[in-house]
């Protein structure tokens, strides 16, 4: 295994030496070439057995990724130094590989050249006899070994510089990493809260109704087995069982709608929000503009549940009977504002429904804000790109 890795390092250094003219040309399109060269060097290091992490996502094309990388400040601290180092070390590898391997080959083949009457010269050495050509063979082997060692050391030096530049602390990257960690924890808590809500709705709603249906059916069976004079009681129990079954079905439909409304999948965001406003116990003044046809399903779902949760909170806590919803859909993004003139004082607390909605919006590249001064009403403002960044 060690011999294979050494062979890979020598081979990559030879490729780097042969690619030196291309590397020089890449300097003409700097800084576009910096991310490409740096990512190529990371691939080289991984192939040679070094521990490096690729920065280019597998689902991104090179043009898209380079465009994103050019807007990152870490490119100047990581990719540009790697590009400069690659240019310098490729120059060194070109000189070592060219003179070292060619010189070693000439020395090893000196007896062959002598047979054809050629005294092959390597530097200051020129054989003058057959004996000297035979002595040149081990010298050529030594020179080849030294060249291989030098190229291997150059490869390790590349890894050292690559690791040093990659460990530079990027404040933007660290901040995003911390935000992702916090978001993951919040999403986990929000999903657990939602799971418990669904379980509670099924247990206290549809399950209780179905238990009542089973009990009434049992009573119905007992009454049907009794005397025929008990016909009126059989009819009454049958009607009660039917009513209980209809209530259970209605509860199940409400629970399923809360998980994902069918109107959202069939008719789109605007129509689903209109249906939501029509079902609300509040008088909802809805204003919608734009076309929601280009919104992705995750984005539309996040916005829908934001409106749903905001209207639910208004009906429970605001102390008013009117709410206003302003929904604006564009070709690239969507904005929604839900407001009331109630008591205000709302806040996004950990584990609350609004906290879960904020993390849901962030998961599609959006954001959610609450403006709720005490006594001044509440505004829930959310926005998101039409297509999630992932």
Image (cartoon, rainbow, N blue to C red):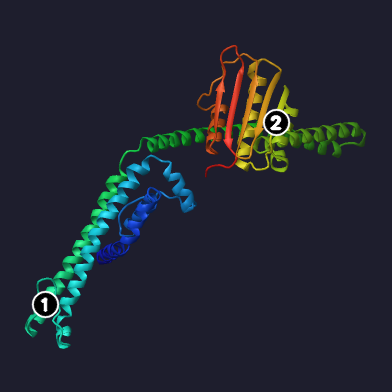
The answer to whether residue 298 is seen in the rendering is yes
Q: Secondary structure at mark 1?
A: helix
Foreground: disc 2 or disc 1:
1
Query: Residue at 91% across / 34% down in the picture?
Result: 231
Q: Is residue 112 above or below residue 76?
A: below
Looking at the image, which is closer to me, 328 or 112? Answer: 112
What residue is shown with label 1?
A: 136
Query: Residue at 39% across / 36% down in the picture?
Result: 172
- Residue lying farthest front? 28
Looking at the image, which is closer to me, 102 or 378? Answer: 102
> Label 1: few (<14), some or many (≥20) within 10 Å?
many
Find residue 141 and report its horizontal and vertical position in percent: 15, 73
Q: Quadrant of residue 9?
A: bottom left
Q: Is residue 128 above or below residue 47?
A: below
Label 2–label 1 contact, CB within 8 A: no
> Is 102 placed left or right of 315 in the picture?
left
Q: Which mark is residue 92?
A: none
Query: Residue at 78% across / 37% down in the picture?
Result: 218
> Is 96 placed left or right of 45 in the picture?
left
Q: Is residue 1 above or below residue 185?
A: below
Q: Quadrant of residue 4?
A: bottom left
> Label 2: few (<14), some or many (≥20) within 10 Å?
some
Find residue 293 and report its horizontal and vertical position in percent: 68, 42
What residue is shown with label 2?
A: 288
Query: Residue at 54% across / 28% down in the picture?
Result: 355
> Is 281 placed left or right of 356 in the picture?
right
Looking at the image, which is closer to me, 225 or 153? Answer: 153
Q: CA distance from mark 2 to mark 1?
A: 87 Å
Find residue 187 and report its horizontal and vertical position in percent: 51, 35
* Of the image marks 2 and 1, the number of the one nearer the N terminus: 1
């Amino acid at each position: 295994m060690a011999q294979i890795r050494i062979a890979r390092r020598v081979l990559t250094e030879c490729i780097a030496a042969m690619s030196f003219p291309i590397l020089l040309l890449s300097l003409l399109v700097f800084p576009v070439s910096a991310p490409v060269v740096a990512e190529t060097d990371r691939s080289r290091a991984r192939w040679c057995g070094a521990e490096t992490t690729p920065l280019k996502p597998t689902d991104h094309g090179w043009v898209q990724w380079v465009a994103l990388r050019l807007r990152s400040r870490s490119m100047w601290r990581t990719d540009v130094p790697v590009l400069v180092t690659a240019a310098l070390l490729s120059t060194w590898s070109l000189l070592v590989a060219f003179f070292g391997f060619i010189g070693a080959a000439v020395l090893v083949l000196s007896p062959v050249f002598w047979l054809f009457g050629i005294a092959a010269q390597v530097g200051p050495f020129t054989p003058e006899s057959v004996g000297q050509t035979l002595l040149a063979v081990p010298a050529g082997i030594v020179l080849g070994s030294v060249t291989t060692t030098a190229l291997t050391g150059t490869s390790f030096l590349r890894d050292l510089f690559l690791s040093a530049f990659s460990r530079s602390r990027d404040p933007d990257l660290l901040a995003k990493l911390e935000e992702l960690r916090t978001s993951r924890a919040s999403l986990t808590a929000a999903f657990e809260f939602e799971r418990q809500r669904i379980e509670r709705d099924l247990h206290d709603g549809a399950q209780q109704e179905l238990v009542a249906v089973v009990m009434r059916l049992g009573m119905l069976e007992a009454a049907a087995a009794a005397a025929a004079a008990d016909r009126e009681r059989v009819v009454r129990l049958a009607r009660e069982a039917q009513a209980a079954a209809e209530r259970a079905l209605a509860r199940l439909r409400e629970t399923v709608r809360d998980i994902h409304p069918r109107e959202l999948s069939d008719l789109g965001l605007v129509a689903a929000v209109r249906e939501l406003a029509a079902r609300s116990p509040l008088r909802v003044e809805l204003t919608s503009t734009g076309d929601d046809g280009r919104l992705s399903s995750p984005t539309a779902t996040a916005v829908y549940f934001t409106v749903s949760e905001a209207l639910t909170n208004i009906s429970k806590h605001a102390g008013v009977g009117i709410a206003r919803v302003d929904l604006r859909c564009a070709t690239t993004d969507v904005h929604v504002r839900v407001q009331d003139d109630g008591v205000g004082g709302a806040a996004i607390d950990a584990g609350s429904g609004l906290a879960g909605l904020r993390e849901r919006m962030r998961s599609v590249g959006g954001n959610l804000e609450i403006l709720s001064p005490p006594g001044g009403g509440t505004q829930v403002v959310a926005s998101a790109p039409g297509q999630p960044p992932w």
